[in-house]
Image: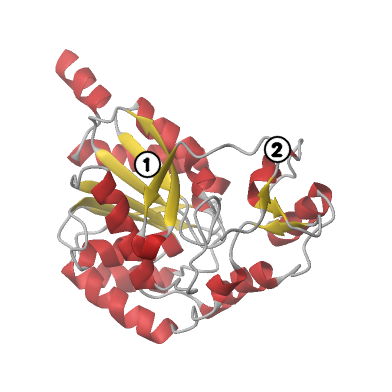
Amino acid sequence: MSAGERLPGTPEPMHRWPGAGGVRIAGDSWGDPQGPLVILQHGGGQTRHAWKGTGQALGDAGYHAVAFDARGHGDSDWAQDGAYGQDAMVQDLRHVVHALGDRPCILVGASMGGGTSLVAAGEGAVRTRALVLVDIAARIELEGVEHIEAFMCRNPDGFGSLEEVADAIASYQPHRPRPASLRGLAKNVRRGIDGRLYWHWDPRFLAGQRDLEGRQSRLETCARALTMPTLLVKGGRSDVLSDEGVRQFKALAPHCEYVNIASAGHMVAGDRNDAFGVAVLAFLARFFPGRHQEEIKHER
């Protein structure tokens, strides 16, 4: 089951892998399959397309970058039983890593995908070489979460055109310039049987996402268990991850490195893909350089 008919011109996923419970997971990849494996996981309400620029940069540097749509998002299946909790997401990650050969991987996760990455790394669900958390930590701010959920719950009756989709996004992210062309928005919606456009995600995804206290306790335990190189990236204008949330996470994982991208909001990679890409590549190059970075190092 999915959100409906894909619009013409929407990019087809490069891969489809089996997830947990029969859910099919759609993904894209970039770079050398023999390079260090980097798994990119998006936030709630996003898709694998949020990582396109980062994935291409990682691929160019000699990494094997893989981004996939979380269950209930994008081109991945909706869960028939409505299971969209943390454990289901972690199990999907395990299935994807298994399909890629059960190799040790570098996990890069934003928001929801960061929570999945932190649990998978902290609880040993996959063999994690390094961890990059993007505007997410054990403690997050309720006001920011409510802001995201309010946007996702708006327009339950869909949209009549891509122009209306653009208006909704502009009201949610007024700091971003309006796109010159609306064609790129087509991948964010699906056409329903009534002919209207609906967001690509399963509305049931938002059910059961409110146990912030239980979530925080679990993520704190996972943060204490981290031993691999870890980078925390904060959007300077974020209303989800606060400075106090950063301080608390660094106390739980003292070896964690930290970067603040001042002009970015919660959607760090989307707001400042250039600065984000530079920070992540510089971090990874010190621990697990890509194949091209290794070649440059040897030439010197």
Report x, y in % for residue 34. Answer: 22, 29
The answer to whether mark 2 and mark 1 are in CB contact below 8 A is no
Residue under label 2: 8
- Please identify, in this view, whether the residue under mark 2 or under mark 1 is nearer the observer: 2
Report x, y in % for residue 132. Answer: 32, 53
Q: Name the side, left or right, on which 177 lies relative to 35.
A: right
Chain-order first, disc 2 or disc 1: 2
Report x, y in % for residue 43. Answer: 49, 59
**Residue 240 is at least partly visible in this image:** yes
Residue under label 1: 66
| Quarter placement of the N terminus | bottom right
The residue positioned 70% from the left and 37% from the top of the image is 8
Q: Nearer the viewer, residue 257 or 2?
A: 2
Q: Where 134 sits versus 33, above or below?
A: below
Q: Where 267 sits versus 82, above or below?
A: above
Q: Secondary structure at mark 1?
A: strand
Q: Secondary structure at mark 2?
A: loop
Mark 2 crowdedness (10 Å alpha carbons): few <14, some 14-19, many ≥20: few
Q: Name the side, left or right, on which 214 lies relative to 223.
A: right
**Residue 106 is at least partly visible in this image:** no
The residue positioned 24% from the left and 71% from the top of the image is 222
Q: CA distance from mark 2 to mark 1?
A: 24 Å
Report x, y in % for residue 168. Answer: 76, 59
The residue positioned 35% from the left and 62% from the top of the image is 20
The residue positioned 52% from the left and 46% from the top of the image is 50
Mark 1 crowdedness (10 Å alpha carbons): few <14, some 14-19, many ≥20: many
Q: Name the side, left or right, on which 238 lies relative to 278.
A: right
Q: Name the side, left or right, on which 185 lies relative to 22.
A: right
The residue type indicated by label 1 comes to: Val
The residue type indicated by label 2 comes to: Pro
